[in-house]
Image: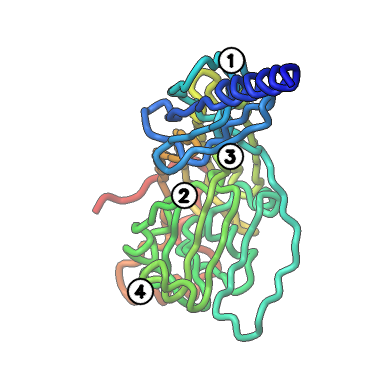
């Protein structure tokens, strides 16, 4: 009988000691680098096969832990996981700080089939980068002519305004990297002040969908989007050199961009274009004073993390256009004479000079 009592007392003592040693709690808070609580962070103790996650206040709690040393892992999507060794000798509180991790995909290709309803009120046509390369050296209006339903309203040989289904100027909205261009509203002789080399995608929104950009977009919307700014990438860029026989024109454009290796999520791009052309040529004579020159540049800087993103963009466009010398008509008699002539009033030798009379 004494032996049975001794065995029972020993078993009770062991169970009580074990129960007392496995009743500890590990709890704490998890914050980001700015001191804000992080909800939904997984807390895992693999040795004890226990896990928890933080509430909206960043608080977590794991109960029924035995005394001993444990490896505790803190992890969540968008944050760098960390593992810390914790010694449990009693109830313990701990504060953890997690750093954000930035993952940027350079290229994402989505292939699918879109079923368009015959009653759809939205029509969007897009020129991608491969299509735009076929238009390099031309104006924005000339590039958009590759899209069905888009034509140009031309003033001379160097000014082209886009026209969608017969509407133009203040009936269209043009967005250059999200910035509205207003200068094309001033008259038929004012073309959009935008360098087509800047865009890696040109989209035209036609129909009722355009009203989301304002009442003046009744004719449609032209959207020019550059490529996404690089993030944590090495130096990269491209150059284009284009020549045209008529007018002996030359175009040079270059783009240089880089992502910062020191500041996560920071990237920048610098782009510029130089264009020069002389008098255009007809079959038997030169169109005097139709030379033109153009100098453009743009710079973009952007930063983003898992929660925020910001971008600054500046674009400069400068062009000087010659006006055909024979287009200066003083009266109706001169106009009638110009119409009946086989050649313009003034035909001089080829030149790169631009001589417009001062008003």
Mark with earlier residue (4, 3): 4
> Callout 4 environment at 10 Å: few (<14), some (14 to 19), or many (20+)?
few
Image quadrant in which you'd find residue 88:
top right
Q: Residue at x 47, y 22 (%)?
A: 91
Mark with earlier residue (3, 2): 2
Q: Which mark lies nearer to you, 4 or 1?
A: 1
> Callout 1 environment at 10 Å: few (<14), some (14 to 19), or many (20+)?
few
Give the Cα separation between the discs numbered 4 and 1.
63 Å
Q: Give the residue number, with chain letter if any, for mark 1.
A: 85
Contact flag, marks 4 and 2 (Cβ < 8 Å): no
Give the Cα separation between the discs numbered 3 and 1.
63 Å
Give the Cα separation between the discs numbered 1 and 2.
50 Å
Q: Is residue 259 above or below residue 337?
A: above
Q: Is residue 243 above or below residue 43?
A: below
Q: Depth check: give the residue in front, 10 or 109.
A: 10
Give the Cα separation between the discs numbered 4 and 3.
37 Å
Mark with earlier residue (1, 2): 1
Q: Give the residue number, with chain letter if any, for mark 3.
A: 251
Image quadrant in which you'd find residue 20:
top right
**Residue 146 percent location from the top left of the image:** 64, 64
**Residue 253 percent location from the top left of the image:** 57, 36
* Secondary structure found at label 4: helix
> Callout 2 environment at 10 Å: few (<14), some (14 to 19), or many (20+)?
some
Q: Is residue 328 visible?
A: yes
Give the Cα separation between the discs numbered 4 and 2.
20 Å
* Secondary structure found at label 3: strand
Q: Is residue 252 visible?
A: no
Which numbered marker is on residue 177?
Answer: 2
Q: Residue at x 43, y 71 (%)?
A: 168
Q: Residue at x 34, y 65 (%)?
A: 187
């Amino acid at each position: 009988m004494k032996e049975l009592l001794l065995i029972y007392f020993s078993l009770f003592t062991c169970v009580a000691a074990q129960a007392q040693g496995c009743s500890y709690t590990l709890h704490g808070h998890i914050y980001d680098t700015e001191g804000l609580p992080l909800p939904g962070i997984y807390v895992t103790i693999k040795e004890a096969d226990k896990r928890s996650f933080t509430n909206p206040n960043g608080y977590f709690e794991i109960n029924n832990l035995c005394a001993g040393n444990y490896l505790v892992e803190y992890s969540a999507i968008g944050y760098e996981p960390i593992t810390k060794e914790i010694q449990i000798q009693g109830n313990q509180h701990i504060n953890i700080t997690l750093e954000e991790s930035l993952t940027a995909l350079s290229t994402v290709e989505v292939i699918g089939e879109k079923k368009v309803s015959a009653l759809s009120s939205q029509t969007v046509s897009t020129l991608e980068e491969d299509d735009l390369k076929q238009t390099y050296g031309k104006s924005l209006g000339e590039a958009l002519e590759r899209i069905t339903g888009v034509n140009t309203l031309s003033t001379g040989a160097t000014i082209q305004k886009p026209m969608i289904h017969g509407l133009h100027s203040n009936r269209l909205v043009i967005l250059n990297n999200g910035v509205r261009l207003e200068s094309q509203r001033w008259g038929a002789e004012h073309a959009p002040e935008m360098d087509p080399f800047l865009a890696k995608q040109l989209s035209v929104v036609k129909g009722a969908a355009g009203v989301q950009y304002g009442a003046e977009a009744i004719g449609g919307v032209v959207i020019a989007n550059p490529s996404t700014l690089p993030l944590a990438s090495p130096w990269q860029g491209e150059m284009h050199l284009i020549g045209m026989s008529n007018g002996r024109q030359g175009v040079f454009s270059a783009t240089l961009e880089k992502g910062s290796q020191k500041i996560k999520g920071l990237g920048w791009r610098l782009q510029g274009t130089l264009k020069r052309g002389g008098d255009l040529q007809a079959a038997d004579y030169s169109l005097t004073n139709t030379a033109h020159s153009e100098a453009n540049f743009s710079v973009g800087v952007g930063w983003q993390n898992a929660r925020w993103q910001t971008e600054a963009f500046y674009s400069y466009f400068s062009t000087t256009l010659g006006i055909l010398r024979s287009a200066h008509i003083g009266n109706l008699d001169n106009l009638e004479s110009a119409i009946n002539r086989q050649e313009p009033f003034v035909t001089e030798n080829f030149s790169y000079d631009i001589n417009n009379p001062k008003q």
